Image: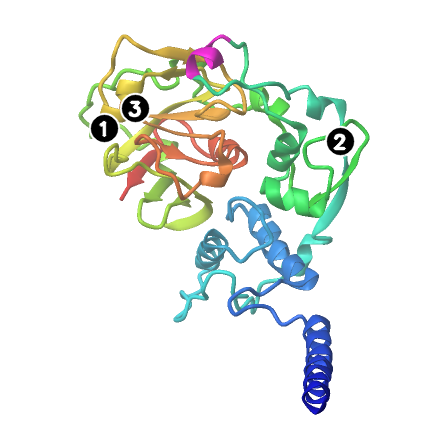
């Protein structure tokens, strides 16, 4: 009996001591080390910087509410455009940087409400996975409404889902969605671009190499030479320069070790809007053309996106993508790949003759 009473006393003490501690843990919600749950204020602050940079044409890539690597690279290049010295201690990813002297509050509200329109859903439809099946379509549209709205507002689809729980893919006209306050990417406006040196869509990645021309000492440099493009394959950033001054920057994906982006000095041949893509597996993997290819139709889910900027090297260009989330991560087949909203902005800044340095 005495032993039984002693056992009951021990059980009571254990329950009494464990209960409050457990309750305190739940109330305080101490996260595991390294798993910091961001507050709404932290998400809004990071998004505000991303929106600010995007509007300034120093693109952070997909907007996701993080101080991502590309966000911090874009910030550094934006500071460079203002003549500021580089930071002696660049911040680490997902660490709030010092914004001294930069008025990010000028963007106004970070998020706005947007009403989905019929036009938004006109470019949504089924997209097969296989290349032969894709080649049979007239266009390669968005797979669902969530993908269309995410691209329109330069946004990570997962982040759009977080902003609009339960609405991401099942959107319909009239639905209100919360989106980042950027200048919207309008797919319908791509055809109205006036790049200055337009090439046929079906010739996008099939322009023959331009014969080398010797410079004429009596010919003045073209006005296009004032603008130049520089691609850094180590940082995965593309910069647009006027003279020595950087005026815009965009994250890019470059080639792999197997199909490397050609290092060197090139120039723009022309711009193709809503290009048709000659999909040649042997060309993509080995750089050798074959007779076994498929012509893929245009559309936002084309492997080369909505714009192709041809360089004076056959099969190599600067183009959009059907996978903006992979920018700077997965390697390309030798080309230079940007998000569709960024390639459209770049296309408006270049024309035939603009030098492109890949280094």
> What residue did someone put label 1 on?
218
Q: CA distance from mark 2 to mark 1?
A: 56 Å
Name the residue: 57% across, 24% down: 190
The disc label shown at residue 284, or none? 3
Q: Image height check: is 328 above or below 278?
A: below
Query: Which mark is drawn over residue 20?
Result: none
Using the image, determine if residue 184 lies above or below residue 141. Answer: below
Q: How far separated are the C-alphas under marks 3 and 1?
A: 41 Å
Residue bearing the label numbered 2 = 116
* Sooner in the amino-acid sequence: mark 3 or mark 2: 2
Quarter holding residue 267: top left
Instruction: Return the x and y of residue 19 as percentages of the image width and height.
Output: 72, 78
The kind of secondary structure the magenta stretch mainly shows is: helix
Q: Residue furthest right?
A: 174
Question: Image quadrant of residue 252?
Answer: top left
Q: Are marks 3 and 1 in contact (CB under 8 Å)?
A: no
N-terminal-most mark, 2 or 1: 2
Residue in the picture at 55% in, 19% down: 127
- Residue 306 image offset from top left, x and y in percent: 51, 24
- Residue 89 seen in the figure: yes
Q: State the separation of the CA atoms marked 3 and 2.
A: 38 Å
């Amino acid at each position: 009996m005495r032993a039984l009473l002693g056992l009951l006393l021990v059980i009571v003490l254990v329950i009494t001591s464990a209960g409050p501690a457990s309750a305190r843990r739940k109330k305080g919600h101490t996260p595991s080390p390294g798993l910091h749950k961001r507050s709404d204020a932290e998400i809004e602050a990071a998004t505000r910087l991303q929106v600010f940079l995007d509007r300034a044409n120093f693109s952070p890539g997909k907007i996701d509410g993080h101080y991502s690597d590309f966000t911090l690279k874009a910030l550094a290049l934006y500071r460079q455009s203002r003549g500021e010295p580089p930071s002696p201690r660049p911040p680490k990813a997902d660490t709030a940087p010092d914004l001294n002297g930069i008025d990010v509050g000028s963007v106004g509200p970070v998020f706005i409400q947007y009403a989905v329109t019929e036009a938004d859903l006109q470019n949504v439809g089924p997209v097969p996975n296989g290349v032969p099946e894709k080649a049979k379509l007239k266009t390669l549209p968005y797979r669902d409404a969530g993908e269309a709205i995410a691209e329109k507002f330069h946004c990570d689809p997962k982040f759009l889902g977080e902003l609009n729980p339960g609405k991401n893919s099942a959107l319909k006209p009239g639905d209100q969605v919360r989106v980042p306050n950027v200048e919207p990417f309008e797919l319908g406006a791509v055809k109205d671009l006036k790049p200055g040196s337009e090439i046929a869509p079906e010739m996008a990645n099939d322009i023959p190499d331009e014969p080398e021309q010797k410079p004429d000492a009596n010919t003045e440099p073209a006005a296009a030479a004032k603008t130049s493009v520089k691609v850094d394959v180590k940082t995965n950033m593309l910069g647009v320069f006027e003279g020595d001054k950087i005026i815009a920057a965009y994250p890019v994906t470059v080639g792999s070790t197997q199909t490397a982006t050609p290092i060197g000095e090139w120039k723009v041949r022309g711009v193709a809007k809503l290009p048709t893509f000659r999909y040649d597996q042997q060309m993509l993997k080995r750089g050798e053309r074959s007779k076994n290819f498929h012509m893929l139709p245009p559309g936002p889910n084309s492997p080369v996106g909505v714009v192709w900027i041809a360089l004076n090297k056959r099969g190599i260009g600067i183009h959009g993508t059907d996978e903006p989330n992979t920018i700077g991560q997965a390697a390309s087949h030798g080309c230079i790949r940007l998000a569709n909203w960024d390639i459209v902005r770049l296309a408006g800044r270049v024309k035939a003759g603009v030098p492109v340095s890949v280094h």
